[in-house]
Image: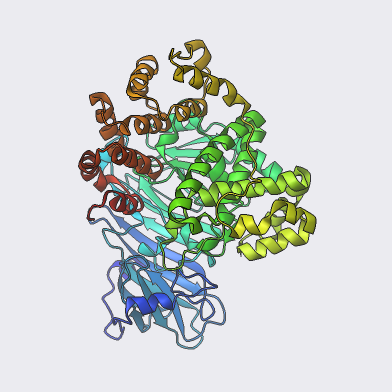
Amino acid sequence: MRKAWIFGMAVLAATACKQGQEAEKAIEEMSISGDLHSYSKPEQAKVQHLDWNAEVDFDAKVIRAMATWTLAEGAKEQVIFDTHDLNIESVVDETGNPLVFELSARDETFGQALSIQLPENTRKLSITYTTSPTAKALQWTAPEQTEDKVHPFLYTQSQAILARTWIPCQDSPGIRFTYKAEVKVDPALLALMSASNPQSTNSEGIYLFDMPQPIPSYLLALAVGDLYFKPVGPKTGVYAEASVVDTAAYEFADMQKMLEAAEALYGEYQWGRYDLIVLPPSFPFGGMENPRLTFATPTILAGDRSLGSLVAHELAHSWSGNLVTNATWNDFWLNEGFTVYFEHRIMEAVYGRDYSEMLASLGHEGLLVEIDDFMAENPEDTRLKIDLAGRNPDDGVTAIAYDKGYHFLRLVEETVGRERFDVFLKSYFSSNAFQVMDTERFLSLLRENLISTEEEQKIGVEEWVYGTGLPSNAPVPDASRFVAVDAAALAFLEETKVLPAAKQTEQWSTHEWLRFLSKLSDADVERLQLLDKQFAFTQSNNSEIVAAWLGMNLRQTAVSEAVDKKAEEFLVRVGRRKFLTPTYKSMIEGGHIERAREIYSKARGGYHAVARETLDKLLEMES
């Protein structure tokens, strides 16, 4: 594609762009196979392939691009795309003739419908556009916010419905397409996508990408930065900034083992390579399962390889989610419940049953807390099959989808036996590869191919999927490694305040420390001071431990100067929502709301939009 087409084409006078109906009416018309979070109507016209040509402008904080879409056969009269704050410059067919298009009224959550009239036999069209500097999917990171503090960094986060903020697309998990891309960046920087990737920079700063397997829009991903690559196995490797890449390669040395363990469980990995990129600290999630290139937070660089379960989780998504995808966001548990189950199976295969049960136990404890919270305020959101109509699907990203989903699948396994369940899952992934799945179809497959009527009744399938709360037959993980930890915590809570000896704790992993701290969550100030004196938690560089420790301290009415300073440093540096939300909540519970707002005012600009939306509401602050 010629550069003049992308960046120099004037808006064609014959192209109509007019404001459409009211936003509320447009939202009502969202309908794609029951997906109420997309304006697109695939029954009229459905995308098949994307060719994306783009230039990344760090100074203006925009991407200038042309998205050329090939439509599936049978397109009728018009095609509808999801957009959000995109400046649409022109729409033309494959011969360059302008096409009439219309943008609906803007909705704050869902953006705008881009409706394009299709002359007869139109199969390909090109949309020239520019993103907004405030596009919600794009995190423009200043050099000082990176590890090496030399070059800026850009990364995307498309899940759940943010792909529409940087590419006009049919933004539904139920619509899959292949793509190719050409991306121009500063020659000093490396561009990567959820596709085939280069492993070093080139002098022109132009990179070509190919994703031959069909993916949904939420798996579109781009990262641009001063990045270096290091292999850790024949089909695995890591990308990171220069000062981080060796640390990352050490931390994730077992990636290849995990990949091989996953293949042994549920069949061939179908995406070519499996690589991982360590992003700046502002990344709002632990990881994102973008095909071929997992996006990961640096907060999992613990130095002892103890947080590798996140890698196992994102790798498992290569089967559950990426290969077989939830049809709508109401079926999100099909992605995450399966992935947590698969994650624990990978961890068991690589590190042993006692290790995976320790992880499952922590998830079980967190689920019980979240279930209690939801049952008090919004019990309907404890259903696996959730109703997100009219809501941001990000509201469904909770422990319910992840851990209640896992417990349900574990119960199925324990009821029918692991051997039968593994045969079923392996067939499930292979038979439905590169397809979408909804809850009802999955349950039909379960009944037809695995469980008997008697087994279904024993499990209580309907209650698990459509009922609220956690059923009484939920499996309870057997975490034998926590027995000594729990005993140590109990001894410290006694009047004598006996601390565990260094010899006892020197082999504890991050997970054992987290269990220890969780058992002391209501410790008084005197005990907290003793703990810090003995174990120096306030000075820890392990983000998981720091977050847990800060929560315990910030819920107190009196907070030490050292803890307050650590809280500000941590909240300004780290953007992972898993840590931000509970830490700010702890400050509120301790009566430190004004201090929380003060820190948030300093930190907010460095957070991703996904985190800002959650925290603006929590702290009742204007955006």
Name the foreground residue: 167 vs 603. Answer: 603
Report the quarter where the N terminus lies: bottom left
571 in relation to 113, above or below: above
User: Between 330 and 70, which is closer to the camera in this rendering?
Assistant: 330
Screen quadrant of the C terminus: bottom left
Count of numbered circles on the image: 0
Q: Residue 457 location, x and y as percent?
A: 74, 56
Whether residue 180 is situated above or below residue 310 in the rendered picture: below
Can the viewer see residue 2?
Answer: yes
Of residues 392 and 62, the one drawn nearer to the viewer in this rendering:
392
Residue 107's image quarter? Answer: bottom left
The answer to whether residue 322 is visible is: no
Residue in front for this viewpoint, 197 or 362:
362
Question: Residue 490, how many percent across, how many down?
Answer: 50, 21
**Horizontal and vertical percent for residue 280?**
35, 41
Instruction: Please indicate whether residue 283 sits to the left or right of residue 382 in the image.
Output: left
Q: At 43% from the left edge and 42% from the top edge, which residue is drawn?
A: 200
Which quadrant holds residue 465? bottom right
Where is residue 119, by image quadrant? bottom left
Residue lying at the far front of the rendered structure: 495
- Identity of the residue drawn at 44% across and 60% down: 393
- In screen coordinates, is 228 left or right of 56? right
- Residue 23 in the image: state x and y as whole percent: 33, 76
Residue located 56% across and 46% down the image: 403
Colouring used for the render: rainbow
Q: Is residue 220 left or right of residue 599?
A: right
